[in-house]
């Protein structure tokens, strides 16, 4: 029997919302307490909801943030797991320390140091995806009612995490380059936030990159006013053109107050669910305590396999091959947007990552238009859910990495029909 069927047969008075059990007749089971208010108030991810609706194989889906599965290094990853299970089975199948396997943290520290941020294994905490790192930070840093500053627009799942923590979320005004440092300084003085959350490189959802001078200015604001900066970098290695911009965490002003998040999801495989955070010692220890309460530790076999991959295979070469394919797909999308979108539309031209952001003329509401577009067997994510404050309803996010250039061209033709039909 389905849940819906069961609930339709139960007496109406058996389902009572409130903080605890209600008194009911002895012959009727007492209702269980309601879920926490913070869960009821946040809701699910619009991206996940769209993916569920557009799971049909004929749909060309620009909505997801999914790496291209045909580009996974399946042989290399499989060999790394075989090594972990055949050569170190007792360790791979056993409990591990909360902080993470030392050999993986050493490899990650070496990669981080090589990219301009001196790091030791003890600076890192391995997490079950970088999404867990965000959740741990919210647990470690935020009390209900604390203020968090975010970009406008902002990564959706970060808004969920901060909302579940009971934070007051305030967007920092900005422009095509990202948050405005002067506006940030004004908000820090006025709002006294605990942290700023930013994805400065190939941002989700816009694809933009925060320029070096703004990163330095953000670091200076954090130093001057006392502010944590959470710098999320899941896409930074997927650069197609231009020069790498140093992390905010590498600025002397911010080194003792920046948490840098990383992930294997976009460069190795999301199914491995491996991320990490680099943070000052006291905050890192607080996150470790939060992780002990969440899952004790990240799966050992996944950690050892990833460490083996970093030892036996060339991840940088693999990422370069992936980036070359993604660049072709980005270019295919950029080439077709002018014909697909209404006259007067504008869009970003990302130097890397997975997404671009479009703004249609003001009269368009991309949420209202989505069903008409899906009827053409193509999908995007409306921009409104990415805003902490007043949304720009004429915006939308497109992911360009999952489809081939030919599929992208066809998808854009369908998108044009849906938007203009």
Image: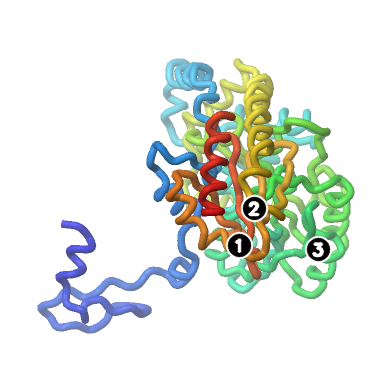
C-beta proximity under 8 Å, tags 3 and 2: no
Query: How far across and down, in percent of the image, does residue 391 sit?
Result: 63, 66
Where residue 385 sits, quadrant-wise, is bottom right
Label 1 element class: loop
Can you name the residue that lies furthest to the left here? 27
Residue at x-position 68% and y-position 36%? 335
Query: How far across and down, in percent of the image, does residue 308 sit?
Result: 56, 21
Where residue 170 sits, quadrant-wise, is bottom right
Above or below for 234 versus 287: above
Residue 277 badge: none
Q: Residues within 10 Å of mark 3 (few under 14, many from 20)?
A: some
Q: Residues within 10 Å of mark 2 (few under 14, many from 20)?
A: some
What's the CA distance linking mark 1 and mark 3? 41 Å
Query: How far across and down, in percent of the image, does residue 7 sit?
Result: 21, 68
Q: Nearer the viewer, residue 290 or 260?
A: 260
Q: Is 158 displayed left or right of 26 in the figure?
A: right
C-beta proximity under 8 Å, tags 1 and 3: no
For marks 2 and 1, the one nearer the N-term is 2
Label 2 element class: loop
Where residue 58 sits, quadrant-wise, is top left
Q: Is 210 displayed left or right of 278 in the figure?
A: right
Q: Nearer the viewer, mark 3 or mark 2?
A: 2
The quarter of the rendered structure image containing the N terminus is bottom left
Residue, disc 1: 364
What's the CA distance linking mark 2 and mark 1? 9 Å
Residue at x-position 68% and y-position 38%? 334
Q: Is 192 displayed left or right of 37 in the figure?
A: right
Q: Residues within 10 Å of mark 1 (few under 14, many from 20)?
A: some
For marks 3 and 2, the one nearer the N-term is 3
Residue, disc 3: 226
Residue 342 badge: 2
Q: Nearer the viewer, mark 1 or mark 3?
A: 1
């Amino acid at each position: 029997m389905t849940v819906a069927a069961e609930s339709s047969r139960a007496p109406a008075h058996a389902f009572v919302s409130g903080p605890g059990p209600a008194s009911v007749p002895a012959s009727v089971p007492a209702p269980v307490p309601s879920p926490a208010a913070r869960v009821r108030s946040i809701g699910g991810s619009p991206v996940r909801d769209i993916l569920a609706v557009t799971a049909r194989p004929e749909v060309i889906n620009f909505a997801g943030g999914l790496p291209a599965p045909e580009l996974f290094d399946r042989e290399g990853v499989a060999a790394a797991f075989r090594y972990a299970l055949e050569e170190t089975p007792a360790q791979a199948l056993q409990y591990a320390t909360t902080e993470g396997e030392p050999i993986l943290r050493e490899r990650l520290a070496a990669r981080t140091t090589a990219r301009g941020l001196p790091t030791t294994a003890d600076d890192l905490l391995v997490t079950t995806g970088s999404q867990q790192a965000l959740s741990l930070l919210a647990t470690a840093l935020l009390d209900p009612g604390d203020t968090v500053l975010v970009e406008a627009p902002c990564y959706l799942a970060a808004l969920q995490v901060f909302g579940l923590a009971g934070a007051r979320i305030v967007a920092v005004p900005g422009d095509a380059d990202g948050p405005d440092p002067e506006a940030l300084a004004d908000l820090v003085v006025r709002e006294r936030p605990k942290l700023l959350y930013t994805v400065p490189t190939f941002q989700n959802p816009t694809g933009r990159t925060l320029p070096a001078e703004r990163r330095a200015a953000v670091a200076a604001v954090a130093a001057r006013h006392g502010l944590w900066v959470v710098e999320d970098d899941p896409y930074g290695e997927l650069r197609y053109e231009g020069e790498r911009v140093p992390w905010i965490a590498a600025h002397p002003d911010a080194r003792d107050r920046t948490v840098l998040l990383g992930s294997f999801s976009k460069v190795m495989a999301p199914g491995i669910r491996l991320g990490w955070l680099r943070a000052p010692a006291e905050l890192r220890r607080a996150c470790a305590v939060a992780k002990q309460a969440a899952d004790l530790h990240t799966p050992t076999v996944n950690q050892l396999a990833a460490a083996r991959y970093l030892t036996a295979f060339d991840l940088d070469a693999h990422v370069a091959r992936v980036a070359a394919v993604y660049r072709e797909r980005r270019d295919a999308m950029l080439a077709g947007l002018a014909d697909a979108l209404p006259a007067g539309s504008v869009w970003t031209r990302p130097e890397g990552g997975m997404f671009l952001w479009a703004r249609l003329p003001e009269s368009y509401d991309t949420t209202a238009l989505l069903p008409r577009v899906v009827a053409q067997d193509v999908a995007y994510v409306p921009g409104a859910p990415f805003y902490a404050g007043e949304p720009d309803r004429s915006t939308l996010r497109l992911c360009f990495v999952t489809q081939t250039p030919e599929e992208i061209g066809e998808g854009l033709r369908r998108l044009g029909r849906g938007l203009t039909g």
